[in-house]
């Protein structure tokens, strides 16, 4: 795999000598997370099969498949020969019930079923903290794997994903990890993300953990970096070999204190909901597609 100058800045992740490059099926590869992790995974020598309804411009080391994760034939073709599936294709924000079921639930089932049928035994499902968005930070910190408390149909679909993953793991002997992803961005975009940030390098570490773990069965882990301003317990991730190393706190000086709120320089306070704007009837009415300008990734507090 080429280690071009463009890729060299993505080198902080180090692969242990006993780990080998793997073939990864990445669904939703044309999306925001896909764009951040594809160059990093390629730079680490992995081969990528990129599946998306939007055509992906394949780079060296990549294959592109244009099609839908809800189509069993497309999914069967895409999983063939993959070592690990990373399933990211989804509506990433609130939608109607029907749209949520079709893509986020049926799409996940179609991908898991294709993996099972093809004998692909390792799957990482892109879940969300919105599966537990109605918990306060303090409640979520009580348990390494708090039970689902979704904040929207979107969050519910991610909770459904977690239990569907467990069905496939328990019944069919697969390793299925659902990650409750936080705010996946190059850098934390706002004070809330001081708690919820997952760096793209840590996302790569998570994928490599799933690709190499000896743990079998179903797992639900936080997709968070090692953030100083998060009390959430990362034990479940460690149990599958996921050790995040980045810390949003190095960016903390960028964010001022929001008027009338707790000290946001320290991220979310213990009594604040993990959901953020997703718990708001005005900003995220349940079952109503979020207006484009409010969509996840666009609700940042202004930077100082
Ligand atoms: N970005 C974040 O901070 C974040 C946080 C929590 C969870 N997540 C989850 O991670 C995943 C990826 O998020 P993202 O931010 O990259 O979202 P995104 O919307 O940018 O990407 C999703 C991709 O899925 C593709 N897609 C849509 N329908 C499809 C279909 N039927 N078949 C195949 N591909 C299809 C889209 O074209 C898009 O490229 C989602 O499941 C999202 O819920 C993201």
Image (tube, rainbow, N blue to C red):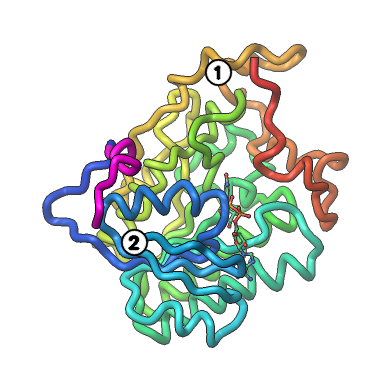
Mark closest to the chain's N terminus, 2 or 1: 2
Location of residue 37 in the rendering, given as x and y in whole percent from the top left corner: 43, 50
Residue plotted at (71% across, 15% down): 258
Left or right: 68, with 80 as reference point: right
Q: Which element is circle 1 on?
A: helix
Q: Give the quadrant of ligand 1.
A: bottom right
Left or right: 201, with 255 as reference point: left
Residue plotted at (32% across, 43% down): 7
Segment tinted magenta in the rendering = 1-11
Q: Quadrant of residue 244?
A: top left
Q: Residues within 10 Å of mark 1 (few under 14, many from 20)?
A: many
Say whether residue 10 is magenta: yes
Q: Which mark is residue 266?
A: 1
The foreground one among 179 and 200 is 200
The foreground one among 132 and 80 is 80
Location of residue 11 in the rendering, given as x and y in whole percent from the top left corner: 28, 39
Task: Please state which of the two labelled residues, at mark 2 or mark 1, is closer to the viewer.
Answer: 2
Residue highlighted by disc 2: 60
């Amino acid at each position: 795999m080429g280690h071009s100058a463009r890729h060299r800045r993505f080198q902080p992740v180090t692969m242990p000598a006993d780990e080998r490059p793997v073939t990864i099926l990445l669904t939703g590869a044309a999306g925001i997370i896909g764009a951040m992790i594809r160059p990093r995974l390629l730079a680490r020598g992995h081969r990528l099969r990129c599946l998306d309804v939007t055509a992906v411009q394949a780079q060296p080391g990549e294959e592109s498949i244009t099609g839908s994760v809800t189509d069993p034939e497309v999914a069967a073709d895409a999983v063939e020969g993959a070592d690990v599936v990373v399933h990211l294709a989804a509506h990433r924000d609130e939608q109607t019930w029907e749209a949520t079921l079709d893509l986020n639930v049926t799409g996940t089932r179609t991908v898991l079923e294709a993996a099972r049928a093809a004998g692909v035994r390792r799957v990482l499902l892109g879940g969300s903290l919105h599966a537990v968005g109605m918990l306060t930070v303090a409640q979520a910190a009580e348990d390494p794997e708090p039970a689902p408390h979704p904040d929207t149909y979107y969050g519910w679909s991610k909770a459904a994903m977690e239990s569907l993953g467990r069905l496939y793991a328990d019944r069919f002997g697969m390793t299925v990890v659902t990650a409750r992803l936080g705010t996946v961005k190059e850098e934390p975009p706002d004070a809330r993300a001081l708690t919820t940030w997952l760096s793209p390098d840590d996302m790569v570490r998570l994928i490599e953990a799933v690709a190499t773990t000896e743990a079998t069965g179903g797992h639900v882990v936080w997709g968070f970096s090692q953030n100083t301003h998060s009390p959430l317990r990362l034990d479940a991730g460690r149990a599958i070999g996921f050790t995040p190393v980045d810390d949003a706190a190095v960016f903390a000086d960028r964010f001022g204190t929001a008027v009338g709120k707790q000290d946001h320089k320290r991220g979310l306070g213990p009594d604040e909901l993990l959901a953020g704007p997703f718990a708001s009837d005005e900003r995220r009415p349940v079952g109503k597609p979020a207006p484009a300008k409010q969509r996840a990734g666009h609700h940042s507090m202004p930077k100082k």
